[in-house]
């Protein structure tokens, strides 16, 4: 993907103009860190630069516009003067949390991110990335999701849970606020429906938004949105 195509991809994901230039610079630094530490920390399934940009960075920000729309609906009344909190649960190498947090920071949204990761060495990697990228809106939480205080977050994202089972669903519903959202990055629609059937007693209603990931047009990607 050349520069023109990359910036068009960013624009399609809701990142345009000067913000796109800053975003690209920060993501290039982020990719360098992933490549440098991947073999030691097992962060992603590839260390190829182009695959990281397409399959991980662009995939992560493909939901940016939708997530931004969801959280902006909560800017009402007293909340206008407060930060909203998004958690990336099981953050691993920081996906989708770091690309999303970068996009929100550059767009000057009043959003704080917490990257929740149970493995201490991965938390060290995440702390390093936050410092290098200058992300003032992010902190790392070295914890299992089960140990997070109840109703802490306005919105929760995750890519790591396959499938989303009853135990984890209960945990996520406990730590998201009332009227808050769970946003799960998923693949095939057929698999999603089978997965959600298993937790229908906990999640009777949900939405599926198709994600158009530039460069991955042949791979089905969807965002499952659950409101508490």
Image (spheres, rainbow, N blue to C red):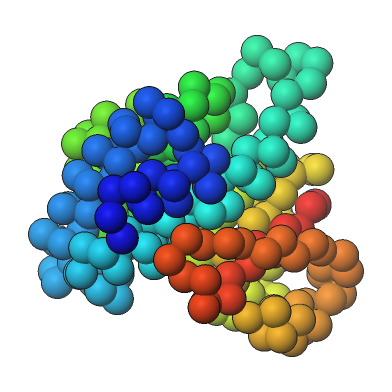
- Residue 62 in picture, x, y percent from top left: 53, 54
What residue do we see at 67% from left, 64% from top? 210
Whether residue 209 is visible to the viewer of this picture, yes or no, is yes
**Looking at the rendering, which quadrant does residue 52 occupy?**
bottom left
Q: Nearer the viewer, residue 114 or 56?
A: 56
State whether residue 181 is above or below residue 164. above
Q: Nearer the viewer, residue 167 or 199?
A: 199
State whether residue 215 is above or below residue 21. below
The answer to whether 116 appears left or right of 156 in the picture is left
- Residue 146 in picture, x, y percent from top left: 56, 60
Total label count?
Answer: 0
What residue do we see at 21% from left, 63% from top? 49
- Residue 178 in picture, x, y percent from top left: 79, 43
Whether residue 89 is visible to the viewer of this picture, yes or no, is no
- Residue 77 in picture, x, y percent from top left: 80, 16
**Looking at the rendering, which quadrant does residue 196 occupy?**
bottom right
**Looking at the rendering, which quadrant does residue 191 occupy?**
bottom right
The answer to whether 111 appears left or right of 91 in the picture is right
The answer to whether 34 appears left or right of 158 in the picture is left
What residue do we see at 37% from left, 53% from top? 5
The N terminus lies in quadrant = bottom left
Q: Nearer the viewer, residue 78 or 30?
A: 30
What residue do we see at 80% from left, 52% from top? 228
């Amino acid at each position: 993907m050349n520069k023109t195509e990359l910036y068009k991809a960013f624009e399609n994901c809701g990142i345009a103009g000067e913000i796109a230039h800053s975003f690209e610079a920060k993501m290039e630094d982020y990719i360098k860190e992933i490549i440098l530490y991947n073999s030691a920390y097992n962060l992603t399934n590839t260390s190829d630069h182009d695959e990281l940009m397409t399959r991980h960075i662009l995939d992560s920000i493909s939901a940016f516009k939708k997530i931004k729309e969801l959280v902006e609906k909560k800017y009402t009344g007293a909340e206008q003067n407060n930060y909203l909190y998004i958690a990336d649960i099981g953050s691993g190498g920081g996906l989708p949390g770091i690309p999303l947090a970068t996009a929100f920071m550059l767009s000057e949204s009043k959003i704080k991110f917490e990257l929740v990761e149970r493995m201490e060495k991965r938390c060290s990697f995440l702390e390093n990335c936050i410092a290098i990228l200058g992300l003032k809106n992010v902190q790392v939480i070295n914890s299992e999701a089960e140990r997070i205080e109840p109703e802490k977050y306005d919105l929760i994202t995750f890519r790591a849970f396959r499938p989303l089972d009853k135990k984890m669903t209960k945990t996520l519903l406990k730590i998201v606020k009332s009227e808050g959202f769970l946003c799960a990055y998923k693949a095939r629609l057929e698999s999603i429906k089978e997965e959600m059937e298993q937790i229908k007693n906990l999640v009777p209603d949900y939405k599926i938004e198709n994600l158009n990931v530039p460069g991955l047009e042949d791979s089905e990607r969807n965002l499952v949105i659950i409101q508490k």
